[in-house]
Image: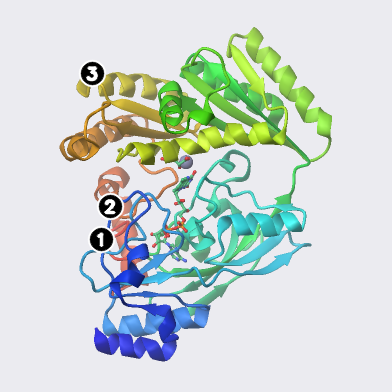
Amino acid sequence: MKNFINQLSVVLDPKYILITDEDKAPYLTDWRKRYTGKASAVLLPSNSSEVSNIVKLCAQNQISIVPQGGHTGFCGGATPDNSGNQVILNFKRMNQVREIDVANQTMTLEAGCILQTAQEKAAEQGFLFPLSLGAEGSCMIGGNLATNAGGTNVLRYGNARDLCLGLEVVTAKGEIWNGLKGLRKDNTGYDLRDLFVGSEGTLGIITAAVMKLYPLPISQWTTLVACESVSSSIALLNLFQRRATSLLTGFEMMTQESLELNEKHFPQMANPLQGKPPFTILIELSDHESENHVRQLLEVILEEAFESKLINDAVIASNLSQANAFWHMREHITLAQAEEGANLKHDITIPLSSLDSFIEETDALMRSQYPGVRIINFGHLGDGNLHYNIAPPPGVDAKIFNESYEKPIHELVYAQVERCNGSISAEHGVGQLKLDGLRAHKGEVAHDLMRALKRALDPQNILNPHKVVSI
Ligand code: FAD
Ligand code: MLT
Ligand code: ZN
């Protein structure tokens, strides 16, 4: 290993090769504090050629590489294993916006560009970069693409994959593939870009990307409404989809139990709706044309929803700070869960037509088999994406609870997901957390194809091994 580190210092300034325990520590544990690994070194390259040279050296020495962005992922994908033989390739120094192409409505970003920086730089030029998630102050565009991140704007603008037009990737051999074309049409054979997006660092290392931009909306209205049931929440979504069409940019759901946990840890985030509704829905409409049109439309749709008894209370944010407060309430549920202690996450998608029966049956099974558990169910309802998270009964030690019940609780939820033809990972990816679950979920044929791809693109198995699939 010493010899390998010496070779590295020829291709990377030694001050960016971190080898002391103290220097490496911040990179070794994931955001949820679920996984801690070891690494022989943390490498901080500043450009694609350095990445390429590092990968070539790793390939020669059979050293595996764990790419890492903001390390906010929920599936342990960016955390090394315990062997101590892996290196972490962290992208924080490759953080530049290379170009904003106004006519083409695209921006070219280095992999380590923080998502919020990308949004801000786009806004400075009058554009919206619509990818948006709770971790946007620290996650990076390379990580967003590697996980095919979703977030709160998918309903209108799609996930990271939908926003990506081109990539620059360092392959497992250390070659640089320049696919940084900002083309909206390109049918030249297999889509390599789509292969790398969502591959969680297992097929190639993303060093830069061309992303789509949109006009900034001039008017946004945010409202919280109270629904009594899942079926009325979905009927409400369909009403908004019909009446507001592309002006509907957000449709998020929070159960009463999720908001109780929020209020416990963030008392300033009390729900402004009356009487603790079972389902609080956050709806956002955005318009590019007129200030008033969208507000009037929102009022008309809400009136119709009241009349059809789909909702029984609503509060429209009267200014930007109130709108932000509504969004903070939604985004703080994840932070409240982290404050509360370890929980069992299920990031699932269910077809909207089965969502009602999924929640009703899974809640009933969960409550009868694990009395007292808290079902922290919230998420991107507009996408059919639930964060169906399970916290232990109040007062029960989370570590002991999870040791005993993690496996059967996952099995219960995933059996229900299969029954409804859903997915066990909507937006967070697979990483190491769902490595075993993936095989059963995808079936032999799909799983074997994935392994064949991995073997073809990374025959030495040096790119983030034992994440997503094992070969
Ligand atoms: P990391 O965690 O560093 O890495 C994630 C994976 O990508 C790893 O497998 C890693 O090896 C790989 N990777 C990283 N960079 C590269 C690269 N340059 N090339 C190749 N592979 C790479 N996710 C959502 O989808 N929607 C949400 O709404 C959402 N909300 C969140 C809220 C909070 C508070 C937090 C903490 C997380 C949330 N997440 C959400 C999860 C997380 O933020 C996303 O998965 C994000 O895309 C990860 O980006 P990152 O830069 O932190 O990647
Ligand atoms: C979110 O949407 O806030 C996160 O993806 C959900 C989570 O914490 O599970
Ligand atoms: Zn989410």
Q: Nearer the viewer, mark 3 or mark 2?
A: 3
Give the number of the disc on residue 368.
3
Which residue lies under the disc numbered 1?
470
**Is 12 left or right of 152, judged from the image as shown?**
left
Q: Quadrant of ligand 2?
A: top left
Callout 2: SS: helix
Query: Residue 120: x, y in percent?
Result: 67, 56
Query: Residue 458: x, y in percent?
Result: 34, 72
Q: Residues within 10 Å of mark 3 (few under 14, many from 20)?
A: few
**Is 252 left or right of 246, judged from the image as shown?**
left
How many numbered discs? 3
- Residue drawn where x is 21% and y is 64% of the image: 82
Quadrant of the drawing holding the C terminus: bottom left
Q: Measure the alpha-carbon separation of dots 3 and 2.
A: 29 Å
Report if the CB atoms under discs 3 and 1 are less than 8 Å apart.
no
* Residue 388, placed above or below residue 462: above
- Residue drawn where x is 53% and y is 20% of the image: 233
Mark 3 / mark 1, whichever is N-terminal: 3
Report if the CB atoms under discs 2 and 1 are less than 8 Å apart.
yes
Which residue lies under the disc numbered 2?
435
Mark 2 / mark 1, whichever is N-terminal: 2
* Amino acid found under the numbered disc labelled 2: Leu
- Residue drawn where x is 75% and y is 57% of the image: 124
Q: Measure the alpha-carbon separation of dots 3 and 1.
A: 36 Å
* Residue 395, placed above or below residue 305: below
Q: Can you tell which quarter of the image residue 61 is in? A: bottom left
